[in-house]
Amino acid sequence: MSQNENLKIAQRGAYLSLVVYIILSIAKYVTGFIYNSAAVRADALNNMTDIVVSIAVIVGLKISIKPADKNHPYGHLKSENISTLLVSFIIMFVGIQVVIENAPRLLTHDKHVPSPITILVSIVSGLIMLGVYVINHKLAKKTNSSSLKSAAKDNLSDSLVSIGTAVGLVFTQIGFPIIDIVLATILGLLIIYTGFGIFKESIFTLSDGFNEKDLEEYRNDILEVDDVLDVRSIKGRYHGSSIFLDVTIVVEPNLSINEAHLICDKVESHLHEKSISSVYVHPEPKIDEATENEIHQSHQ
């Protein structure tokens, strides 16, 4: 399956999340407003930030599908990372607003008791998001989409938050109404934490950071190819959900250019099978330590 086909399939999961988040955020906010629950309203705002995330994922995936051109020889795959970075600021802003609204109420001894209906709404919401997580997790594994994988984790987090909110609201029914405001404040802090996590990941990707463990795995994959003696260097970059690798391999010194080129082709094919989108392989001859020292000294 091609990269574009995978991106189109990944969009289905993003659209599913978007529709569900819109329905749940409206239902929760109306319920929280009518039945006086700050925690449910905060959970609704949490889902509203997820609407923005889903839209960013969809927009990023759509732009990523555009083919390479003169100004973008590597394609438009990083559009997904840029949109995610912008979304992180929105999420953190919403979280700060939730904390500012609810934290001062902890000192006012607010004793409003939410309706038991808010508990039911939170439980149903949590179960629905658990179902969305299962679907998106399967799609993310099928398409190898990093953005959909992150969205699936967010789905699971939202499910647990809603169920946790329901458990907390039970305490408001047995004489602890302050728990509702405490939960709202905690949810605000959680939203800020989520936004900051997305911000860190986006900056890491946009600054060409790469997971060292993944590089080591790819190094081992390359060494599986026949006639590759060693991997002298390997560098990686993330472009959206795609991975680009630059590799220098060591081959026998007596090989012809054509023979070395064929080995490079084998490495590229092998890595493409591992879902690497783009691979550049450079061969270098194996040399003994004495020769290597001579070359090093001549360059000084």
Image (cartoon, helix red, strand yellow):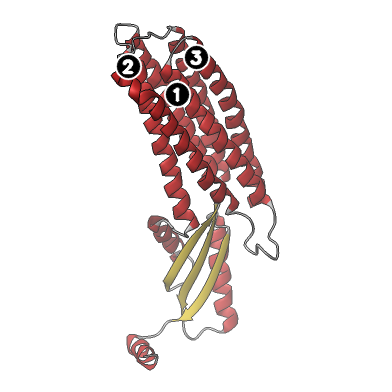
Identify the disc placed on residue 42.
1
Image quadrant assignment for residue 234: bottom left
Name the residue rendered at 54%, 34% in the picture: 136
- Label placed on residue 179: 2
Element under disc 3: helix
Image quadrant where one finds the C terminus: bottom left
> Could you tell me the amino acid type at mark 2?
Ile
Tell which circle, 1 or 3, labels the residue nearer the N-terminal end: 3
Give the percent coordinates (x, y) of residue 105: 34, 20
Q: Look at 44% across and 40% down and name the residue there.
A: 195
Amino acid type at circle 1 is: Ala
Task: Measure the C-alpha gap from mark 2 to mark 3.
Answer: 17 Å
What x and y, as percent, mark residue 124? 49, 16
Q: CA distance from mark 1 to mark 3?
A: 11 Å
Judged left or right of residue 233, residue 151 is right
- Rate crowding at label 2 as few (under 14), some (14 to 19) or many (20 or more) other CA atoms within 10 Å: many
Residue 134 visible in the shown view = no
Q: Residue at x 58, y 44 (%)?
A: 143
Of the pair 262 and 86, the residue shown nearer to us = 86
Local crowd at mark 3 within 10 Å, few (<14), some, or many (≥20)?
A: few
Question: Mark 1: few, some, or many residues within 10 Å (few <14, many ≥20)?
Answer: many
Q: Mark 3 — residue?
A: 33
Q: Earlier in the sequence, mark 2 or mark 1?
A: 1
